[in-house]
Structures are given as C-alpha cells and as structure tokens.
Amino acid sequence: MQSDRLKILLVEDDELFRLGLQVRLQQEPEIESLIEAKDGETAIDLVKQQPFDLVLLDIGLPGMGGLETCRQLKQNYPQLPILILTSHSEKPLIARLVTAGAQGYCLKGIAAETLILAMRSVIAGASWWDATATAEIHTLFQNNSPADPSTAISLTPREQEILALIATAKTDQEIAEILYITPGTVRVHVHTILHKLGASDRKQAVSLAEPLLMRIAIQTDRIDGC
C-alpha cells in the first residue's frame, strides 16, 4: 500500500530562507520528505529521478531562472503542481507565471500557515493567487480573444472539470461524488474558479467562461465519438 504522505521539492538558492522553510515544513505530519535544490537544472534532474507531489519554486534562481524551470517542468510533467515563491508581485510577472503554467504564487514572508494552506490547495488541484494576481488574470481574460479560450482563462484541468459540472447545475456534493473528491475540496476549487474569473457567483462564472465550456464540450464529444 502506497503512503499518502507528501513528497515536496523545494527549489531555493537562499540558504537561510531554505533552512527556515525546511524546519517549518518538517513539522507537518503529512510531509514524508522535503528534497532541496539550489537551481533549476538540479530540480529538473531530481524530478526525472523520482515523483513529487509539489514543487515549491523560487522565481529568482541562478542559471536558467525560475520561470524557465517552471516552463520546462510543466512541459515534461504537466500534472506536476508548481507553487512559486517570490519576494514581490508585479503584473508583468503574474502574466508570465500564468503562461509558464504555475498554479499560483506566495510572497516570501507570509505566515507559515498561509503557505501550508496554499500548498494543500495546489496539491488538491486548485490554484493559489492573491487579490493582485486575481485581478490581473481577470484582465488577461477580458483582453484575450474568445477564439483562444485556453489562453484567456488560466484554469487547471481539474478546475475545468468542476466548471463544466457547475454549468450542469451540479451541487458540491454531486461534484464530489462524480470526481471522487471531498465536498471541501470542491469548495476550494469553486472559490478559486470564481476568483480567477472575477465572478460573484456560479452563474456568472459559467457565463464568463462560456467559450471555454464550449471547447471542453467539443473535446468531450470527440473523445466519446472515438
């Protein structure tokens, strides 16, 4: 029987920050191992050697840098959750993080409890963006062409599944049963979806994401018709 405990890869070149984070995360009983890397090249090699449940990735790495590391990891391991660590949030950075495939970011210096909550959310398949990032993602959505909804809305595959079920008026409990997850996890996803789309409720989220939902429906029909 496989262990449900988590394997985390921490990619951070600041030794003091890395040590402090290591000490705090090792207090979490659900974390089985915390492997460390000082640069992107080492991180990519480690991911090739063993599976991880989450990558905590510093954006300001030496060498290839955090963004390129994120791009390469997501290109080769699209299901691998990546949470970015950064010293500051800027709108151009947020856009690049979305493009690179990150599931969210946390500012260095936030409360440890908040970081752990973000990690759990990302591992569960949700995203983690603060108010600044959410507003920027919404702007990107509004400014992108509906002809390319995949770039207009940065939703994870799990969030897209849940959004499609929301569009069919499924409740949290029904969605949980269909996807074999807990209702609490569904609520985390729904909260993230609403924030990403800048929607006040489920009905508005479905309306805003109509181009993406149409694409999902077309893809599903193609799969079913194979």
Image: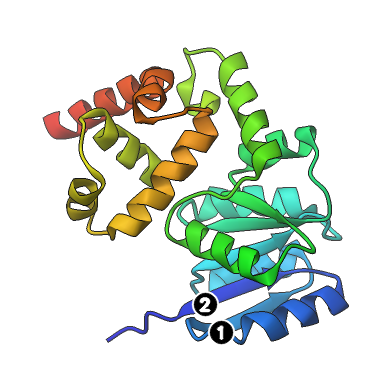
Which is more N-terminal, label 1 or label 2?
2
Residue at the spot of label 2: 7
Q: Secondary structure at mark 1?
A: strand
Residue at (26%, 47%) from the top-left corner? 172
Q: Is residue 67 above or below residue 160?
A: below
Mark 1 residue crowding within 10 angstroms, few (<14) / some (14–19) / many (20+): some
Q: Is residue 216 left or right of residue 34?
A: left
**Mark 1 residue type:** Ser
Where is residue 87 shown, x and y percent of the image?
83, 55
Q: Is residue 138 left or right of residue 51?
A: right
Q: Which mark is residue 33?
A: 1
Between residues 191 and 53, which one lies in front from this camera angle?
191
The quadrant in which the N terminus is found is bottom left
Q: Secondary structure at mark 2?
A: strand
Residue at (18%, 54%) from the top-left corner? 177
Q: CA distance from mark 2 to mark 1?
A: 5 Å
Q: Are marks 2 and 1 in contact (CB under 8 Å)?
A: yes
Q: Is residue 26 in view from this perspective?
A: yes
Q: Is residue 208 left or right of residue 57?
A: left
Q: Is residue 90 above or below residue 178?
A: above
Where is residue 189 shown, x and y percent of the image?
41, 47
Where is residue 152 shown, x and y percent of the image?
54, 24
Q: Is residue 80 in view from this perspective?
A: no
Residue at far front of view: 200
Between residues 42 and 178, which one lies in front from this camera angle?
178
**Mark 2 residue type:** Lys
